[in-house]
């Protein structure tokens, strides 16, 4: 019906060009590929199978291949079905391999081999998209589950305090009922019924509120292109809601257990015991009596030492064990260490209060003396509030630090990978003067700086794999985004040094070269040493090089020298030389010059210029392939669903925990102040003025809030230094490969660029907000205690 020509490298044709092929020398048989209709071809095959056409009329000289394409209906696949989908695909591959593989007996079917392949599944031991995604999920879910568990534990602690406050609020009523003849069983069932009603309401409303919050926050977190993830909720949210009762029942169970113990303690006490306990605490908290803080501290320290020791010897463990055991411990152990240190401080806090109270007794003011004396006699409630607030502050501040560090890290890694605003490989460049090549690419719209060079992999002395960067030392510094952490010298100084020594080089010792730390370590070299490199598509020539300087990393290479994270085979070493000097060396050595194959571009930041440049780079006449757009990559990484999931979880979870902690502290302080209204009224009746009473409460509350804030800041810094480097991650391609990482490479990639802990300016806003809320809470409680008089309190007591 017609003749047409296929596009070059079109993946649809599986490498076939539909050009005629000849056999023999000289050619005897010429084969002409044909494009046929699939129904017509199958109809003809059916006719052959039913012998409607004599077999002698059609002879197949060679076997042919048939491709069937199967596409996933993405809209009907949710994360809940993902593990089952991967398992079924593996099973289907195994069935095809057993029944129709190359080792199976398919002669009766006239079939040589049937197999499944494609980007979605593994093939020839290469993981497919689904497996790589599963690896990413398994790795990224580790910090997500650990952080969500820590936040959930903090919320449960808030629930425990609220439950104990509910029982404590009615402790006086319990003792009065017991003294008037009510049995313990009656009182217990009465209060248990109240807690059960609240628990049932929480069980019914909690999942519905969670669903509403997800529907509210997800559209604001995810990019527009991925909002189809909400299809898992609507129009049938029941499968998702079916996952929540486990967590809700767990929280309610803990609340009921705490309520049971609190009721048991309240039922065993009378009014006299309650007054004695309120006046002077005689029983230490459960965790102090069993030395849980000391035990937790010892276990956390031992585990942290083991993690550090194991990380320093990566060969002891395989990659899977390291990712599934050591990586979670690097996050979990610091959290337990912080909790243990906080509990240990709270054990020593009453002693510190006694010392401060002793010093206050020597002062001239009575308000601090009364405040610290009261806190020394009964410190349990203050300890609970300090623990709750300090943990909430620590996680809240750490979340801000993590969010900023993650944002900066994504930009750093992208800059490291692309080296410039745009980088690309030149696929086919004719031999021409370098100035003509510069002129052709510099004329592109929006280009402000340009550098051309030659990059290829070769073999260094001692069969060490290495990557050669032959760059233009005159333009490389102003074009690339060189990070200051890569070397002690700036890139402009390094390029000036390379250009000066390359210009004066006589090639007696070799071509001047700048190498990275990996090259020095692999070859045991130093500045001034000589070595060689061959391969790198240089033909039979060997380049002899002399080291004039070194850097920590040459950008775009994932060759971290950190022993704890370089878990795979040694990655390529990096060598920087001058491109023109390399060509002069090749000509002098009797070889041919090497045409450049790499280009880096800096461009304007305006959206109009970027759009014009991106359209121009898509022109096939430029012969540019594997184009990396730095800005587009940064946008893509910032919209990565797993990054957004972890950021959203930490920010929303910690903010929720922080708000609940402030609310719990306010309720506890309010209840404590109400229970002491008679005491404050007595002080007023004895001649203490309102200002002095307010000072007593002010000193108490400032001590609680101030201690919690200082502890929160200190432990936030500890968590930022120990936990944040293990949370920061990215999924940037490695060495220009257009694939996303999975497994160990995915997790170790974060250490291409050293992670810098960033303390954002928003921390000051959070601190200011915390102080403002605390001041407001203190003013409200002062107003509460100053309002009633002694006669009013006596009338209340009589009632």
Image (cartoon, rainbow, N blue to C red):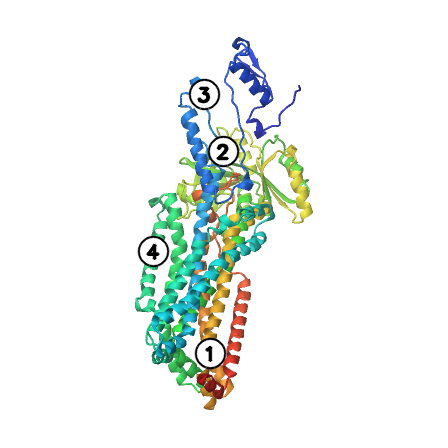
Establish if 647 lies above or below 364. above
Residue 655 percent coordinates (x, y): 51, 62
Disc nearer the start of the sequence (4/1): 4
Identify the element where label 1 is drawn: helix
Instruction: State whether residue 257 appears in this view.
Output: yes
Query: Within 10 angstroms of label 3, few (less than 14), some, or many (20 or more) residues?
Result: some
Name the residue tied to disc 2: 536
Disc nearer the start of the sequence (2/3): 3
Identify the element where label 4 is drawn: helix
* Residue in the foreground of this view, choosing between 466 and 673: 673
Residue 450 percent coordinates (x, y): 62, 42
Disc nearer the start of the sequence (3/1): 3
Name the residue tied to disc 4: 303
Establish if 177 lies above or below 202. below
Residue 112: give its label.
Answer: 3
Q: Write the residue at 53% across / 8% down.
A: 56
Q: Nearer the viewer, mark 2 or mark 1?
A: 1
Q: Nearer the viewer, mark 2 or mark 4?
A: 4
């Amino acid at each position: 019906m017609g003749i047409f020509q296929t596009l070059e490298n079109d993946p649809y044709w599986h490498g076939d060009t539909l050009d005629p092929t000849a056999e023999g020398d000289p050619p005897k048989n010429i084969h002409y590929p044909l494009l046929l209709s699939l129904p017509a071809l199958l109809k003809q095959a059916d006719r052959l199978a039913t012998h409607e056409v004599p077999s002698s009329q059609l002879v197949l000289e060679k076997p042919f291949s048939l491709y069937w394409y199967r596409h996933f209906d993405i809209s009907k696949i949710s994360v809940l079905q993902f593990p089952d989908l991967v398992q079924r695909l593996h099973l289907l591959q195994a069935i095809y391999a057993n029944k129709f593989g190359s080792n199976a007996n398919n002669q009766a079917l006239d079939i040589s081999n049937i197999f499944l392949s494609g980007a979605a599944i593994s093939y020839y031991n290469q993981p497919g998209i689904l497996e790589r995604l599963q690896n990413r999920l398994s790795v990224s879910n580790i910090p997500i589950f650990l952080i969500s568990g820590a936040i959930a534990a903090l919320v449960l602690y808030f629930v425990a305090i609220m439950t104990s406050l509910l029982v404590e609020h009615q402790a006086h009523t319990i003792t009065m009922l017991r003294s008037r003849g009510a049995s313990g069983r009656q009182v217990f069932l009465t209060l248990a019924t109240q807690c059960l009603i609240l628990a049932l309401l929480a069980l019914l409303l909690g999942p519905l509120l969670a669903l509403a919050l997800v529907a509210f926050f997800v559209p604001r977190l995810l990019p527009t292109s991925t909002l189809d993830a909400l299809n898992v909720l609507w129009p049938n949210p029941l499968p998702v809601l079916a996952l929540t009762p486990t967590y809700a029942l767990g929280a309610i169970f803990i609340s009921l257990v705490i309520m049971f113990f609190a009721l048991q303690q309240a039922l065993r006490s009378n009014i006299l015991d309650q007054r004695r306990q309120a006046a002077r605490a005689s029983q230490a908290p459960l965790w102090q009596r069993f030395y849980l803080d000391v035990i937790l501290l010892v276990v956390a320290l031992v585990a942290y030492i083991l993690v550090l020791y194991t990380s320093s010897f990566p060969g002891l463990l395989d990659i899977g064990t390291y990712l599934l055991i050591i990586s979670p411990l690097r996050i979990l152990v610091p959290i337990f260490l912080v909790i243990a240190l906080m509990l240990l401080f709270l054990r020593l806090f009453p002693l510190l209060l006694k010392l401060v109270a002793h010093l206050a007794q020597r002062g001239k003011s009575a308000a601090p003396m009364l405040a610290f004396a009261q806190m020394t006699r009964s410190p349990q409630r203050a300890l609970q509030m300090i623990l709750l607030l300090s943990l909430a502050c620590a996680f809240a501040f750490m979340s801000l630090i993590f969010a900023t560090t993650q944002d900066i890290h994504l930009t750093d890694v992208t800059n490291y990978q692309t080296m410039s605003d745009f980088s690309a490989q030149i696929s086919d460049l004719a031999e021409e003067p370098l100035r003509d090549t510069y002129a052709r690419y510099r004329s592109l719209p929006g280009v402000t700086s340009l550098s051309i060079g030659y990059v290829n992999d070769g073999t260094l002395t001692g069969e060490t794999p290495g990557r050669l960067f032959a760059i233009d030392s005159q333009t490389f510094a102003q074009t690339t985004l060189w990070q200051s952490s890569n070397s002690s010298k700036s890139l402009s100084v390094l390029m000036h040094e390379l250009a000066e020594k390359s210009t004066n080089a006589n090639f007696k010792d070799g071509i001047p070269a700048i190498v990275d730390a990996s090259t020095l370590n692999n070859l045991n070299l130093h500045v001034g040493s000589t070595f060689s490199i061959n391969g790198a598509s240089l033909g039979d020539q060997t380049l002899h090089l002399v080291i004039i300087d070194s850097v920590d990393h040459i950008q775009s290479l994932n060759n971290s020298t950190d022993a704890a994270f370089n878990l795979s085979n040694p990655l390529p070493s990096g060598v920087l030389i001058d491109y023109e000097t390399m060509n002069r060396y090749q000509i002098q050595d009797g070889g041919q010059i090497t045409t450049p194959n790499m280009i880096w571009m800096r461009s304007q930041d305006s959206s109009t210029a970027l759009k014009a440049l991106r359209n121009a780079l898509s022109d096939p006449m430029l012969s540019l392939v594997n184009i990396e757009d730095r800005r587009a990559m940064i946008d893509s990484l910032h919209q990565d669903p797993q990054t957004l999931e972890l950021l959203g979880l930490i920010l929303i979870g910690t903010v929720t925990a922080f708000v609940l902690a402030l609310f719990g502290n306010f309720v506890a302080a309010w209840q404590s102040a109400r229970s002491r209204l008679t005491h404050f009224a007595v002080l007023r009746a004895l001649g203490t003025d309102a200002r002095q009473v307010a000072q007593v409460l002010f000193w108490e509350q400032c001590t609680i809030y101030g201690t919690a804030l200082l502890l929160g800041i200190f432990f936030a810094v500890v968590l930022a230094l120990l936990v944040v480097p293990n949370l920061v991650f990215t999924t940037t391609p490695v060495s220009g490969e257009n694939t996303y990482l999975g497994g160990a490479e995915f997790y170790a990639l974060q250490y291409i660029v050293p992670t810098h802990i960033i303390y954002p300016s928003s921390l000051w806003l959070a601190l200011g907000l915390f102080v403002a809320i605390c001041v407001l809470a203190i003013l409200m409680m002062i107003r509460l205690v100053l309002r009633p008089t002694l006669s009013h309190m006596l009338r209340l007591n009589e009632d």
